[in-house]
Image (tube, rainbow, N blue to C red):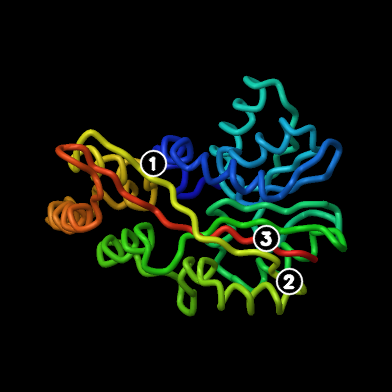
Amino acid sequence: MPTTWSQGDYPSMAKRLNPAAELVVERAHITFGERVLDVACGTGNAALLAARHGADVSGVDIEPALLAIAGERAREVGVRVHWHRGEAEALDVADGEFDAVLSVFGVMYAADHEAAARELARACAPGGRVVLASWTPGSFMPKLGGALGPYLPPPPEGSLPPSRWGDSDQLDQLLGDAGLRIEASERQRVALGFDSRYDAAHFLIDTAGHVVSERRRLQGEGRWTDLLADLSVLIAEEDRGRGSRAVLDCEYLLTVARK
């Protein structure tokens, strides 16, 4: 069943986030013939990079449309990846099947953080590594969620913020309880550049399926212009560009953990 991830132009955002996937794969030290799992793989950024290192790669995501795009990208670059539809909280893989388990801005959106962390650990072979990229609390992407939240359906009751995965202390406990030991954490940034703040606002909306899916309702309620106004205020506050060009720095936590 399709999700809201298919209702916006998320692939365009994924292209902008590829530098983070490159760094995750680099820190994972993927070697030829290793078994690698990309959890919540989206359009396949990390999975494709790992496959180009000669790894035996599987990618899992909840959204069929994104998996279809990932499959097409794999064919275009001439690599083989095993794509599967599934949830991060219940991976259809064997215990200890993978030498490296990766997730780039993916597993952090799982509804049940503890279950997802346990699945990362379960999929990882003893001595293997788990490498994650997650937005840090207070950085641009969580602020974006905060600005848009009043206009969108509420999250499931009892759910925790995805940026919990970007808090080094909380992540240490979360992964530690699952049987993973953090070896390294570092803050990194992805810069999103635009010709103008106007372009930035429309890009952020058009690539967010959960916002696109609510546009008609909000327009009917007369609240769409309010959403645009709040988004414009956030962009103005966060813009680090010069002149008319807008630059939004998106900070994330890059974490390497060991089983």
> Percent x, y for residue 234?
22, 58
Q: Residue at x 80, y 40 (%)?
A: 31
Using the image, tell me which numbered label, if any, was put on residue 181.
2
> Percent x, y for residue 117?
67, 68
Image quarter hosting the C terminus:
bottom right
Q: Residue at x 54, y 37 (%)?
A: 65
Specify the quadrant of the image occupied by residue 48.
top right
Q: Is residue 192 left or right of residue 156?
A: left
> Percent x, y for residue 158?
48, 79
Using the image, tell me which numbered label, if any, was put on residue 256.
3
Specify the quadrant of the image occupied by residue 92.
bottom right
Q: Which type of secondary structure does the marked residue at label 3 adopt?
A: strand
Q: Residue at x 58, y 44 (%)?
A: 21
Crowd class of label 2 (few under 14; some 14 to 19; many from 20; radius 10 Å): some
Q: Is residue 126 left or right of residue 221?
A: right
For the residues marked 3 and 2, what is the alpha-carbon distance in whole angstroms?
9 Å
Up/down of 162 relative to 101, above or below = below
Specify the quadrant of the image occupied by residue 194.
top left
State which tag comes first along the sequence, 3 or 1. Answer: 1
Using the image, tell me which numbered label, if any, was put on residue 8.
1
Q: Is residue 40 left or right of residue 5?
A: right
Up/down of 239 relative to 159, above or below = above
- Report the front residue among 217 and 156: 156
Crowd class of label 3 (few under 14; some 14 to 19; many from 20; radius 10 Å): many
